[in-house]
Structure formats: structure tokens, C-alpha cells
């Protein structure tokens, strides 16, 4: 599917140690997004942050945290994202889900073959 133009971006902010049935929550979200056929999902590990608990988690050596912030970012069309949101309701019990409008500009190889390595 070619995705260019208006879209929605979902950013799910959770803790690195959050789980769903003994599996990392961020991994569960990515696999559900994949099964749902969404255009893409990426996980980014934060180096410092705090949430509802007001406890600051950091990757700095002297105060090494084992529960760093994690952001799962998903981008697709509005309809597909809205259809996926109930799955997030099911698995995210603590965290923050942000949905915002975005514009997608997707780049492919010069020869038009997607995913081809040079």
C-alpha cells in the first residue's frame, strides 16, 4: 500500500517493563499493528522521562533505571488507525496514547523498487 498525504499518527507512551501476558507491551502493540495490516510501527526507547507516577526514569549511569520510557509510533490512514484504537484500549492499562494528524511523504528507491538494498 502506498501511503502519501493525510494520515494519523498514534504515539503510545508506556514503560519498558510494562507487559501483556508476560510479553513486553511495546512488542504486543507492534505485533497487533502488523496483524491489523497497518502501514508501519516503530518502537523508540527513551533516555529519560516521567509519567503519572512522577518518578523520573533515566539511562544515566549513576541512576540507571530498568523501566525507561518507550514510545510506539504507528502511522496509517485515519480509518485504519481508528479501527485499531480498540486494540490499544485492550492492552494499555497505564500510559498515554496520543493521536494526531500528520502528513506523510514516503520515499522509495530511485528505480521505484521498494525495499531494494543497494
Image: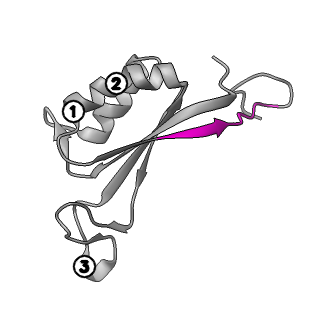
Whether residue 102 appears in magenta in the rendering, the answer is yes
Bounds of the magenta segment: 100-109
Which residue is situated farthest in the bottom direction here? 62
Q: Which residue is denoted by mark 3 in the rendering?
A: 63
> Could you tell me if residue 38 is visible in this image?
no
Q: Which residue is denoted by mark 1 in the rendering?
A: 91
Q: Position of residue 100 (x, y in %)?
A: 49, 41
From the viewer's perspective, tell me whether residue 68 is left or right of residue 46: left
Pointer 3 or 2: first along the chain: 2
Q: Is residue 21 above or below residue 97?
A: above
3D distance between C-alphas at marks 1 and 3: 29 Å
Residue occupying image coordinates x 32% and y 36%: 27
Q: Position of residue 50 (x, y in %)?
A: 28, 66
Q: Which residue is denoted by mark 2 in the rendering?
A: 32
From the viewer's perspective, tell me whether residue 30 is left or right of residue 116: left
Residue occupying image coordinates x 37% and y 23%: 84
For the C terminus, the quadrant is: top right
- Few, some or many residues within 10 Å of mark 2 (<14, 14–19, 20+): some
Query: Which quadrant of the view contains residue 33?
Result: top left
Dot 3 falls on a residue whose secondary structure is: helix
Question: Of circles 3 and 2, which is in front?
Answer: 2
Question: Of circles 1 and 2, which is in front?
Answer: 1
Pointer 1 or 3: first along the chain: 3
Q: Position of residue 40 (x, y in %)?
A: 51, 30
Amino acid at each position: 500500500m502506498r501511503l502519501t498525504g493525510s494520515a494519523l499518527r498514534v504515539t503510545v507512551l508506556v514503560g519498558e517493563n510494562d507487559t501483556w501476558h508476560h510479553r513486553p507491551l511495546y512488542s504486543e502493540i507492534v505485533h497487533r499493528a502488523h496483524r491489523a495490516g497497518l502501514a508501519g510501527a516503530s518502537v523508540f526507547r527513551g533516555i529519560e522521562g516521567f509519567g503519572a507516577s512522577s518518578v523520573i526514569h533515566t539511562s544515566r549511569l549513576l541512576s540507571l533505571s530498568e523501566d525507561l520510557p518507550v514510545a510506539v509510533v504507528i502511522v496509517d490512514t485515519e480509518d485504519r488507525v481508528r479501527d485499531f484504537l480498540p486494540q490499544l484500549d485492550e492492552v494499555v492499562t497505564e500510559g498515554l496514547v496520543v493521536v494526531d494528524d500528520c502528513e506523510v511523504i514516503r520515499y522509495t528507491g530511485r528505480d521505484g523498487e521498494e525495499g531494494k538494498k543497494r
